[in-house]
Image: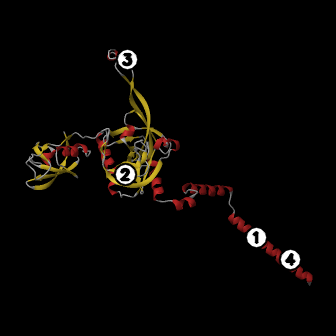
Amino acid sequence: MANIIKYFLLGVLTGLIILGMSKFYLDFKNNYVSKEELKQILADQNNFFNQVNPNYKKIEPRSNSITRAVQKVNKAVVGINVVKLKKQYIRSPFSDDPIFRQFFPPRYVNKKIPSVGSGCIYSPDGYIITNEHVIHNAYEEGIIVTTTEGKEYKAKIIGADQISDIAILKIDVKDHAFIKIGDSEDIIIGEWVIALGNPYGLFEYSNQPLITVGVVSGLNINFGKSRDGLHFYESMIQTDASINPGNSGGPLVNSEGEIIGVNTMIYSSDSGGSIGIGFAVPINKVLKIKNILMENGYVNRNINWGFQLSNLNTDKKDVAGVSVVNVLENSPAFKAGFKKGDIIVGVENLKINNFADIKNALLEAKDYKVNDLVDFYIYRDKDYKKIKMQLEAY
């Protein structure tokens, strides 16, 4: 009897073992992955992690509007290396001799000087916005643009305007990443902004723009003509985002990744260094200049105002301004409705008291161009009127 029980239990145990092995075999067979299938799985995983940063668990919580804006515009920013020609005086041994120096006049040679700047691509076919002073006096084929792909291109100057300090370049690319254009009329004082560019030529070491972050500190900052008289800076955007040598021409971007200005100048101390105040040309003005340069290659400021002015007679004490003494027929002033005897008391937001004021308003305070509209305020027949004049060229 004991043997019967023993053999019965042994049979049950053997059956369970066989059943378990059968199930293991079936599970193994159903879940077996061949060498080729394993390679495909690993390849799919690699493709996934190439699209999603492998450190996404660490990075994603730190992502914000600034980092997202940088990712949007990063590939549109370029470094610009320029070789400029500068006249250098060659001193003659007879320079100090009043007799011999008339036979040996001073000589000048063109010296090549390297310079760096920044820019951004604003169209997929390679048109670039930058500052005119970045490429000023560049010798032929002396402008090299470096993209974030590490490629270098010889740039062609499409147009450059020294007074507004805007230039348009072109490189030979297709379907390139480009920057989204914002609206500089929609800027809020205090909003975050990002300056991107090529400070000190560091772009070429990493093929990546360097960024600084700050806020919009002020709007509509007017400097008028620069000290050298070559540039005219008006309605500038002020920011505390650090702008350094080489940043000129680079984009000032909002937190949406849109260009709202072109970084142009800094406010410096007596030592010449930056004190953390920078200024950018608003993008709306840049686009107006860009359109003119694309169409004509230059900006026409040879304006025909169409009137003759003088100071008021001393007996006219009821109003201050300048008198219109003549209006030329078919001129802009004539078409706008000016009449002889009108007294101009204001131009745009400037009050006019005398001839010096009107000269400053028309020639110094604002960069007027052909086709601009100008608001004049006049006194006529004991009443004040507003006249809008569209400027024309001679």
Camera-near label (2 vs 4) is 2
What's the amino acid at mark 4? Leu
Camera-near label (1 vs 3) is 3
- Judging by the rendered image, the residue that carries numbered circle 1 is 22
Marks 2 and 3 sit apart, C-alpha to C-alpha, by: 51 Å
What's the amino acid at mark 3? Phe
Decide: marks 1, 3 in contact (CB < 8 A)? no
Marks 1 and 2 sit apart, C-alpha to C-alpha, by: 78 Å
Secondary structure at numbered mark 4: helix
Decide which of tag 4 and tag 3 comes sooner along the chain: 4
Camera-near label (4 vs 3) is 3
Q: Position of residue 150 (x, y in %)?
A: 50, 42
Q: Is residue 104 left or right of residue 204?
A: left
Marks 4 and 3 sit apart, C-alpha to C-alpha, by: 124 Å
- Judging by the rendered image, the residue that carries numbered circle 4 is 10
Decide: marks 2, 3 in contact (CB < 8 A)? no
Marks 2 and 4 sit apart, C-alpha to C-alpha, by: 92 Å
- Judging by the rendered image, the residue that carries numbered circle 3 is 94
Decide which of tag 1 and tag 4 comes sooner along the chain: 4
Quarter of the picture holding the N terminus = bottom right
- Judging by the rendered image, the residue that carries numbered circle 2 is 238
Marks 1 and 3 sit apart, C-alpha to C-alpha, by: 110 Å
Q: Label 4 crowding class (10 Å Cα cut-off): few <14, some 14-19, many 20+?
A: few
Camera-near label (1 vs 2) is 2
